[in-house]
Amino acid sequence: MPLKDKLPPGQHAVTKMVAMPPIGGSHPHIDKKDWRLRVCGEVENEIIWNWEEFNKLTQKDFVVDFHCVTHWSKLDQPFFGVEFSDVLRIVKPKPKAKFVIFESADGYTSNVVLKELKENFAFIATKMNGVEIEDKFGGPARVVIPHLYAWKSTKYLTAIRFQEKDEPGFWETRGYNNHGDPWKEERYS
């Protein structure tokens, strides 16, 4: 596919992933022996996975385009992880669940409509470029939602909440668009 067809409006391609500055000043480090992923809220099967348990789930290689709201895109970026659809099958969201809130070890949150996650492709990455994800890129696990700007792809993932009502996340409460489609340039409200 020609480069111009892979880049959303206002974006330019970079050759390497960019490590964005962390919210709190330094990148959190989460030791894998201490890492937990809690999935809760409007689901039939609340669960808390540790690193070993989570890595027993089916994991796959993914190659996706990754678009940052700051105008850069990393095309054909390799990741490895668990498809979000597999998480949905395990936890079984209740009918009243409409939104998913991703929580980070540093207090960051992002919100996504559950229907959109069901209809589009997303995953929880545990590796990038064939190695475990470095702290500066959001390790040990991060969400990747390729069809939305990267601020929706929460780094340092520690919890996933399913709920009936929307709860704008860190950037949405600071003027970013609630949806974040790069092809529509939904950068700011």
Image (cartoon, rainbow, N blue to C red):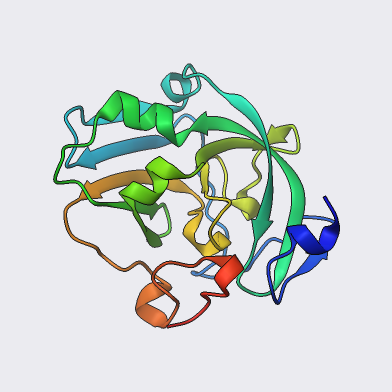
* Residue found at x 50% / y 22%: 55
- In the rendered image, residue 58, in percent from the top left (x then y), is placed at 51, 19
- In the rendered image, residue 145, in percent from the top left (x then y), is placed at 52, 50
Depth check: 149 or 171 in front?
149
Q: Does residue 37 appear anywhere in the picture?
A: yes
* Residue found at x 20% / y 51%: 163
In the image, is residue 25 above or below residue 74?
below
- In the rendered image, residue 148, in percent from the top left (x then y), is placed at 53, 59
In the image, is residue 56 above or below residue 101?
above
Is residue 173 rendered to the left or right of residue 5? left
Depth check: 23 or 144 in front?
144
* Residue found at x 38% / y 41%: 118
In the image, is residue 60 above or below residue 121?
above
Q: Does residue 14 appear anywhere in the picture?
A: no
* Residue found at x 57% / y 31%: 81
- In the rendered image, residue 120, in percent from the top left (x then y), is placed at 48, 45
Q: Give the quarter of the image for residue 44.
A: top left
Q: Give the quarter of the image for residue 139.
A: top right
Quadrant location, the C terminus = bottom left
